[in-house]
Image: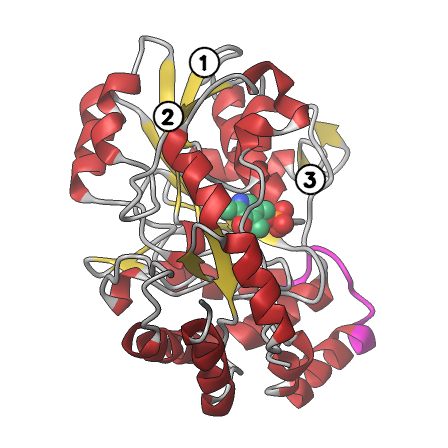
Amino acid sequence: MVKLLDLQAITAMHGDEYKAAVSRVIDSGWFLQGNENKRFEADYAKYIGTEHCIAVANGLDALYLLMRGYKEMGLMNDGDEIIVPANTYIATIIAITRNNLVPVLVEPTWEHLEIDVDKIESAITPKTKGVMIVHLYGRIAYNDNLGEICKKYGLKLMEDCAQSHGCVWKGVKVGALGDCAAHSFYPGKNLGAFGDAGAVTTNDAELASVIRALANYGSQKKYVFKYVGMNSRMSEPDAAVLDVKLKYLDDDNKARQKLAAYYYEHISNPLIKLPKRISDENNVYHQFPIFCERRDELQEYLKENGVQTLIHYPIPPHKQECYRGWNARSYPITEKIHREELSIPMNQVVSVEEAKEVVSALNSFR
Ligand SMILES: *Cc1c(COP(=O)(O)O)cnc(C)c1O
């Protein structure tokens, strides 16, 4: 059985280093807001190329805090609009609506799977305050045109980097391309903790300081509360583990890119469409999505042939019950992606043998 994601094997690659890091924290007796968080924040900010990094409890909180920060700064208000891709994980949308902001869903392109930058300008209204891009599947969602549109209309450019740690646009890492960015370190991400964890990166010193306070009950000074905040902090063991894992991220991504190259070279079934191949710099292959009109049959066939897969995602946000008011809307490209997408094994521990098995199962589907 080729597993979609073997976290046991991935963790075992550097297991002793993780154990040593966690032991160090246990022995220190200090579990929150300590040196491990400070070190990871400094190292991650350096890696991304921003001045500030704020470690938080998870990716959803990181996303929420970006806009909550702008609201506390008076730059966004209830009812303002945020442009966002219609095809994203639900967390991106929840972060917007939980801030009483209005998500304006924009279709992706079928070719690139990321937000259609040509459709952004016509979605802008006087209420638009920001654009939230999502580098979905590890593919770059940014281009220079998008940056120019945001500047021209004075919109905050926010990035959801939950699936794209280490992805680069013209020498700049995602997470440093816009005004601020949210990162998730959910265990299955390219950079994953041993539980929930997340971070915000930005060069905006004021936003950084507001978000740091908001994530700590709204407090900048002990027992003095400026905002009605929340408790969203990263544990010290997680920070220690992530700091170890960060050293290996670029190598892990290279292994993913190598596997992707193998897939592009060898998957040749005309019933299966592969996503447009873009340069390795622009894709860290969080997932390797393939598309098939008979997706459910293909998934069953792969299972019978020992290949685990997963659908990212079966139901788009606008068809979810939690957003029932949008259910009648139609976003045909988004819906096609959700109808045909299947993610095949993609990570740093898939062996050459396993990759061959995946390819041969895919190519024998009729
Ligand atoms: C995983 C993910 C999130 C949420 O991150 P959590 O740490 O699980 O809260 C947000 N957006 C996208 C695109 C994701 O893949």
Density class for disc 3 (Cα within 10 Å; few <14, some 14-19, many ≥20) is many
Q: In which quarter of the image is residue 145?
A: top left
In the displayed structure, would residue 138 be above or below residue 201? below
Q: Give the CA separation, mark 2 to mark 3.
A: 25 Å
Identify the residue position indicated by label 3 in the image: 216
Whether residue 199 is visible here, answered yes or no, is: no
Taking 152 as reference, is 8 left or right? Answer: right
Which kind of residue does numbered mark 1 sit on?
A: Asp
| Mark 2 and mark 1 residues within 8 Å of each other at the beta carbon | yes
Lower sequence index among marks 2 and 3? 2
Whether residue 341 is visible here, answered yes or no, is: yes
Position of the N terminus, as image quadrant, is bottom right
Q: Residue 31 at what x, y percent from top left?
A: 78, 62
Task: Name the residue located 78 percent from the left edge and 65 percent from the top edge.
Answer: 30
Task: Name the residue located 27 percent from the left edge and 68 percent from the top edge.
Answer: 280
Identify the residue position indicated by label 2 in the image: 130
Q: Residue 159 at what x, y percent from top left?
A: 40, 42
Q: Give the CA separation, mark 3 to mark 1.
A: 26 Å
Which element type, helix, strand or loop, lies under badge 2? strand
Q: Residue furthest front?
A: 366
Q: Quadrant of residue 64?
A: top right
Lower sequence index among marks 3 and 1? 1
